[in-house]
Image: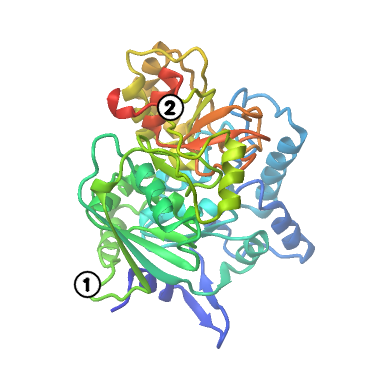
Amino acid sequence: MNTLFDKIWDSHIVQTIEGGPTQLYIDRLYCHEVTSPQAFDGMRSRGLKCFRPKQIYCMPDHNTPTHDQDKPIEDPVSKNQVDTLAKNAAEFGLAHFGMMSKDNGIIHVVGPEKGLSLPGMTIVCGDSHTSTHGAMGAVAFGIGTSEVEMVMASQCILQQKPKSMRITINGKLEKGVTAKDVALYLMAQITTSGATGYFIEYAGDVVENLSMEGRLTLCNLSIEMGARGGFIAPDDVTFAYVKGKEHAPKGDEWDKAVAYWKTLRSGDDAVFDRELTFNAEDIEPRITYGTNPGMGIGITESIPVSQADKAGFEKALQYMGFEPGEKLLGHPIDYVFLGACTNGRIEDFRAFASIVKGRRKAANVTAWLVPGSWAVDRQIREEGIDKVLADAGFEIRQPGCSACLAMNDDKVPAGKYCVSTSNRNFEGRQGPGARTLLCSPLIAAAAAVTGVITDPRVLL
């Protein structure tokens, strides 16, 4: 019996080249301003139009400032990239959700919330965290700029079929443990290269009980395990989330779509190339201490004394200013970042607010709270979360990738510690010399009000 991955992949094969790649049909191409300019230039130089323009959506997010978006962008490089995307979208007749439009935000947040990412689809974008859309029950993966051009020109892509892996997490998560903690735990267990060459299907009690936002977070981080992507079989949680969304099927088409989506599951006798099983009870709130997302510990644990990669381990600790065997609890921090395509959704802001409510932001902390889209921003205000945050001394910035990566104004200064809900803690990722500690919105909130790394369970 085929896996779900086989079902979606096989239904999108245009042709298979003997001993070579598969020509795969693509349902949705997302373009942002950083990885698309050369693709558009390539199309232009060959005199080509986009083959299926209605299946391509463009949106700036990496370079957008998170304040004064109604004014011209000050940074010339960022301004050029954002302006170029707008011009290219207009020239090639593509949908473009520009800055300050109600539809704008981070592309991996907007796609699902608008019903553009749907079960059974193949979805690509010139961005590694395209795996996020796998939470919808889609095969979604990042591609390079030359491949972006290939999809523009033909709505197809040449791909080697990855191997299949199923990760099952059974049991019930403890209080204060989130999807982000699950992902950080998996990375530490299988390492940041442990899923290289695989496409992951997540399954088990924990995954079934995750909200859509939680599933999006988990799938977002698949790439940090080395996987080509990660996804979750669509179920009632998926259907309830999609129903009524702007681009979701309507009326009879909805009934037909759901009937098809219900067939999208791996058979009971499906054979995976690799199977891994974990227990929810083994996972506590987690935080990273090093310079890759797999270098993490439970919040109450100590940094390991050594690792197999001794030189890399020592270099990471030196960069971070930590010692082997040290505990992170109580360590002072400087910045807190809530946002990114990993944790910039409404549920993440609710979680953050649940801890800061009735408390005050620590005086030593600079906090950047950045919604993943204008739709999230509207929901924050409708639910009164903005008032809770304002009363606690926080302000909400405008949507964008923000401090996830140093491509806009939100850069963490050298040597400063940033407790961050983003996806990567590489050297210099949040600014030259910045020190990033990845965690959930709950740990970020706990640090924001105490000024030090704190177990969120004591504040819940």
The reply to whether callout 1 and callout 2 are in contact (CB within 8 Å) is no
Q: Is residue 431 left or right of residue 263?
A: right
**Residue 127 at what x, y percent from top left?**
57, 52
Spatial separation of the CA atoms under disc 1 and disc 2: 43 Å
Residue position marked by numbered label 2 in the rendering? 453
Q: Is residue 402 visible?
A: no
Report the disc number at residue 162. Answer: none
240 relative to 16 in the view: left or right: left
Check disc 2: other Cα within 10 Å, few if <14, some if 14-19, many if 20+.
many
Q: Which mark is residue 268?
A: 1
> Which amino acid is tagged 2?
Ile
User: Is residue 222 in view from this perspective?
Assistant: yes
Residue 428 image-quadrant placement = top right
Q: Residue at x 54, y 34 (%)?
A: 322
Foreground tag (1 vs 2): 2
Considering the numbered disc 2 on the image, is that residue within a helix, a strand or a loop?
loop
| Tag count | 2
Quadrant of the image containing the N terminus: bottom left
Q: Residue furthest bottom?
A: 18
Residue in the image at 56% along x and 52% along y: 310
Pick the front one: 345 or 11: 345
Q: What amino acid does circle 1 point to?
A: Asp
The quadrant where residue 416 appears: top right
Between 30 and 455, the residue placed more toward the observer is 455
Percent from the top left, x then y, of residue 76? 77, 34
Q: Residue at x 62, y 27 (%)?
A: 69
| Residue 294 x, y percent position in the rendering | 47, 49
Residue 226 horizontal/vertical position (percent): 50, 59
Quadrant showing the C terminus: top left
The image quadrant that residue 440 belongs to is top left
